[in-house]
Each structure stands twice: as structure tokens, then as C-alpha cells.
Image: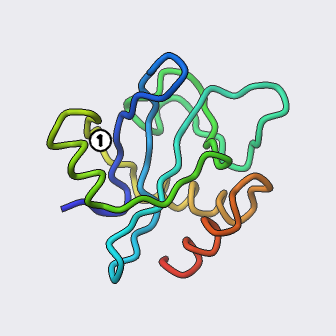
């Protein structure tokens, strides 16, 4: 069973490099989850949530949450991808890091409004 705070390594275009994705909210009634991913910071990027090395075992560089690519996806899609090794499960985030990421969602200028509303309705 998947839950808030679970993380996955998901290959992303253009080079299919694995990025860390985190479930930050779940709507139980519809079985869908809100995911955000973590990237290396670039000049001018959204710094609403900066994550330091050591806050999660996958991260070997200081990183930022890439709120612009937040997505709402059916949990069944994640389970299918896990079962078929399209994505890999990784260590869950700590409660503190989860809260930090959720708080960043509320202040990010880049988060799609439907994702912000989803989070507000499901935390």
C-alpha cells in the first residue's frame, strides 16, 4: 500500500535520468496522489523548498523541489509501474522533510493551482 511520504525513482525525459519523486498528498476517495520531484537547482529556479544533502539518502547534491512539474496521478498507475519495474521505490522522506515540501507547495509561484488546491484539500 502506498502512502504519503513514499518516494520513487522515475526515469524522466530527455535522457531518462532517474529523478526522486515524492507522494505529498493522497485523496483516499478517488485513489489519486500528488507527486513532486527533486532536481538540481538552476539559476532562476523556484527555491520555495531547498533540500540539503543528508535530508534524504538519494540526494548527493543540494536540491530543490521542482513544483512546476507537480502531478496528480492514479495510485493504480504507480502500483503498475512498480510491479513492472518501470519505476523503483526508494526510502520514504522523514516527517520533517515531508512537512517542509508541503509548506513549499503552499508558497511556490510555480505550482499548478489544481495541485495546490489538491494538497490543501488532502492534508
Query: Along the horizontal axis of the image, is 38 left or right of 59?
Result: right
Location of residue 94 with respect to 117 vertically, above or below = above
**Location of mark 1 (residue):** 91
Q: Percent position (x, y) of residue 37? A: 52, 42
Instruction: Please provide percent x and percent y for residue 14.
Output: 55, 20
Q: How many badges with numbers are in the image?
A: 1
Q: Can you say whether 42 is above or below 55 in the image?
A: above
The front one of 72 and 21 is 72
Name the residue rendered at 52%, 25% in the picture. 13
Give the residue drawn at x 57%, y 55%.
101
Q: Nearer the viewer, residue 58 or 66?
A: 66
| Secondary element at tag 1 | loop
The residue at the far right in this view is 44
Picture residue at 25% right of the left edge, 59% below the top: 76
Figure check: 43 above or below 123: above
114 with respect to 28 (left or right): right
Amino acid at each position: 500500500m502506498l502512502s504519503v511520504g513514499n518516494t520513487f525513482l522515475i526515469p524522466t525525459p530527455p535522457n531518462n535520468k532517474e529523478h526522486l519523486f515524492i507522494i505529498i498528498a493522497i485523496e483516499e476517495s478517488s485513489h489519486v496522489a500528488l507527486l513532486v520531484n527533486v532536481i538540481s537547482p538552476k539559476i532562476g529556479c523556484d527555491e520555495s523548498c531547498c533540500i540539503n544533502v543528508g535530508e534524504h539518502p538519494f540526494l548527493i547534491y543540494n536540491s530543490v523541489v521542482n513544483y512546476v512539474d507537480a502531478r496528480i496521478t492514479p495510485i493504480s498507475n504507480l502500483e503498475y509501474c512498480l510491479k513492472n519495474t518501470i519505476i523503483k521505490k526508494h526510502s520514504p522522506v522523514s516527517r520533517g522533510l515531508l512537512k517542509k515540501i508541503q509548506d513549499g507547495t503552499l508558497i511556490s509561484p510555480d505550482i499548478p493551482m489544481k495541485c495546490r488546491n489538491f494538497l490543501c484539500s488532502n492534508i
